[in-house]
Image (cartoon, coloured by chain):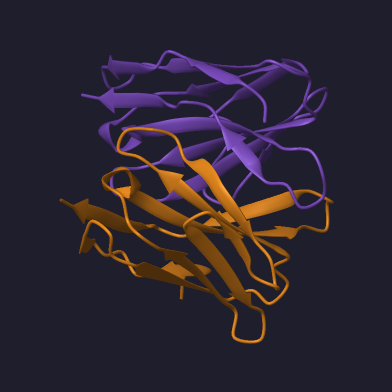
Chain colours: A purple, B orange
């Protein structure tokens, strides 16, 4: 599996501000995924980020709120814009393993608290 | 109805006990199945894939019943270190060729000395 790092590991932010989360992978990958895990909940996919094209967003998530960049095959960023306390969550990036039946591997996550 | 359903627990068991978790999924087009483990304040980590023939990895046995759309995880001889939340994950290919994962809400296991 790939080695994935995220920055920052945690942050406390004021409402109305924005935070950009970085995800770095130690190998080139076609797709990177951004998930949210709210307190006590399971993971929800926000969007899929392909290099060289716009991200694909899941229902309930929009580009204005969660802009994503994917400048190369090892890096992606997710911005949480105009934050409110409801955005307090863990944000995780993931990449697919190799092979048709392989699954996804996750970064350590970014724990965001919005006051 | 949720696409992947799990009993949230918690399951409180003594060390050495055998414990089983169940999971049901609603989409018959689902193709791949996994169990992940998530420790408190950590990211989910793949525990094992689940195959129709059933598969075993040490103390862990996973089974899949496609007809009933049911997945199980059995843990034998529970250790304190098994305490975690176990996530049932179902994957299918979308029309775009992308693989979509759906996560259950997890079953919490607490192994007690």
Left or right: B90 in relation to B77: right
Q: Position of residue B75 (x, y in %)?
A: 41, 62
- The single residue placed furthest to the left in the displayed view is B113
Relative to residue B44, is residue B17 depicted above or below? below
Q: Is residue A21 left or right of residue A68?
A: left
Q: Position of residue A38 (x, y in %)?
A: 35, 42
Does the rendering let one see residue A41? no
Q: Residue at x 15, y 51 (%)?
A: B113
Instruction: Name the residue: 58% across, 25% down.
Output: A67
- Residue drawn at (62%, 21%), measured in percent from left and top? A3
Is residue B109 visible in the rendered structure shown here?
Answer: yes
Residue A13: % across, % down: 29, 17
Residue A8: % across, % down:
42, 13
Q: Please tell me which residue lies in front, A58 or A31.
A: A31
A55 to A102, vertically: above or below: above
Q: Does residue B77 appear left or right of residue B28 in this picture? A: left
Question: In this picture, is B108 found above or below B37?
Answer: below
**Is B85 positioned to the left or the right of A80 in the image?**
left
Q: Residue at x 39, y 17 (%)?
A: A9
- Count the numbered circles shown: 0
Look at the picture and state if A53 lies above or below B50: above
């Amino acid at each position: 599996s790939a080695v994935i790092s995220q920055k920052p590991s945690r942050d406390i932010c004021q409402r109305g501000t924005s935070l950009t989360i970085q995800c770095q992978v130690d190998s080139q990958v076609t797709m990177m995924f951004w998930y949210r895990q709210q307190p006590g909940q399971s993971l929800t996919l926000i969007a899929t980020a392909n290099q060289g094209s716009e991200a694909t967003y899941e229902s309930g998530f929009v580009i204005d709120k969660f802009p994503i960049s994917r400048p190369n095959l090892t890096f992606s960023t997710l911005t949480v814009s105009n934050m409110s306390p409801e955005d307090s969550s863990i944000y995780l990036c993931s990449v697919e393993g190799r092979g048709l039946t392989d699954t996804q591997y996750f970064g350590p996550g970014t724990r965001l608290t919005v006051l | 109805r949720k696409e992947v359903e799990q009993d949230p627990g918690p399951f409180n068991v003594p060390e050495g006990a055998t414990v089983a978790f169940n999971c049901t999924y609603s989409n018959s087009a689902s193709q791949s199945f996994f169990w992940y483990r998530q420790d408190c304040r950590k990211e989910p980590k793949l525990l094992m894939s689940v195959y129709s023939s059933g598969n075993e990895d040490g103390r862990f046995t996973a089974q899949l019943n496609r007809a009933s759309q049911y997945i199980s995880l059995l843990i034998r001889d529970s250790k304190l270190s098994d305490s975690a939340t176990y996530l049932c994950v179902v994957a299918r290919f979308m029309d775009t060729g992308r693989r979509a994962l759906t996560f259950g809400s997890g079953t919490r296991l607490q192994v007690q000395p």
